[in-house]
Image (cartoon, grey):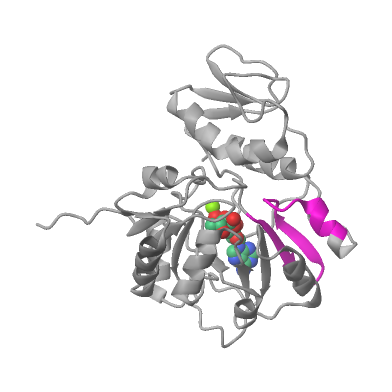
Amino acid sequence: MTEEPGTELLNADGPGLTRAAALLACGALVAFPTETVYGLGADARNDDAVAAIYAAKGRPNFNPLIVHVADLDAARTIAELPAQALDLADAFWPGPLTLVVPIRPDAGLSPRVTAGLSTVAIRVPANELARRLLAQFGGPVAAPSANLSGKVSPTTAAHVMAGLSGRIAAVVDGGSCDIGLESTIIGFDPEPTLLRPGGLPVEAIEDLLGQPLRGSQPSELPNAPGQLASHYAPNAALRLNATEARSGEYLLGFGPVAGNATLSASGDLHEAAANLFDRLRAADATGAARIAVAPIPDHGLGRAINDRLRRAAAPRD
Ligand code: TXA
Ligand code: MG
């Protein structure tokens, strides 16, 4: 019997990216860094490669994927961007913004990418390695976060390996992700609608559009398919808005709440976002039955942090 080939850890250099692009071209799965989280990439035109993403993650096939492209021109070969989507793309691409827009009939994507929807989620990542990989590969790359479905998203190559080693061909090791939270997702139906808060603050989008986003009230339910209530879940149970640890709890602090570890001692939301998933993993690794988390202000990146924390704390059944 032959041994399962291991997952290659590729350097963030010319040879590493050349290898990564060659693997994508032959239909293999390659995890790579973006400015938000690590993505699990496959050629978005290759049906078998896209099917392999769902299999490797254990992801339900009704949860569509984000297509990553090198620039706006490439996005326009795949989708029709309404005027407000173009405004957002001009202002915020490359960057942590995903636009859900009508797919073109001649897009050439595997239908599995969109899970049969008539819209497609697209983004142009800002991370230098991601951009070089997309340029070298020369095609659209479907990439969800590179974690097992329902688990905490990866912000380092080691996080990717912890969940997917042996299940994917390779990981490009680009160090820690700058932002640390997934992209903000905006749809148009036809009003601009917040489908998932993320690395681009809602306030920046509303300022640019000059109007409030639909769905941006915290009380409204999330609209993105596959946005399950329980998500981003560590093994431990979570308790939110905690100012001190109860017996047996591991406390994640923020600002004045010190805790066993802190998301940001100075109360900086960017630092807290960048630390969030790594600190949740580290807290989990202590074996604590429960993780308590200090209150996080609900503005700017804090909205996306609180969204992830609420999902991590949601009942899992
Ligand atoms: O920052 C990110 O967005 C990362 C990096 C790798 O780019 N990717 C990411 O992918 O977070 P994933 O698969 O974990 O989340 C994709 C989200 C899902 O909630 C899915 O429901 C939504 O995008 N989505 C994809 N296509 C959609 C569509 N046509 N309509 C509505 N939502 C869609
Ligand atoms: Mg994900």
* Residue shown at 50% from the left, 27% from the top: 283
* Residue shown at 43% from the left, 49% from the top: 148
Q: Is residue 135 above or below residue 315?
A: below
Chain part drawn in magenta:
183-207
Q: Position of residue 54 (x, y in %)?
A: 43, 61
Q: Residue furthest top?
A: 247
* Residue shown at 38% from the left, 68% from the top: 18
Quarter occupied by residue 276: top right
Q: Closer to the camera, 158 or 43?
A: 158
Q: Residue furthest left?
A: 1
Q: Residue furthest right?
A: 210
Q: Is residue 148 left or right of residue 122?
A: left
Q: Is residue 213 visible?
A: no
Q: Is residue 147 above or below residue 259?
A: below
Q: Residue furthest front?
A: 14
Q: Is residue 47 left or right of residue 300?
A: left
Q: Is residue 272 above or below residue 39?
A: above
Quadrant of the image containing the N terminus? bottom left
Q: Closer to the camera, 242 or 92?
A: 92
Q: Position of residue 75 (x, y in %)?
A: 62, 76
Residue 220 lies within the magenta run: no
Residue 190 lies within the magenta run: yes
Q: Is residue 248 visible?
A: yes
Q: Is residue 165 above or below residue 170?
A: above
Q: Position of residue 311 (x, y in %)?
A: 61, 41
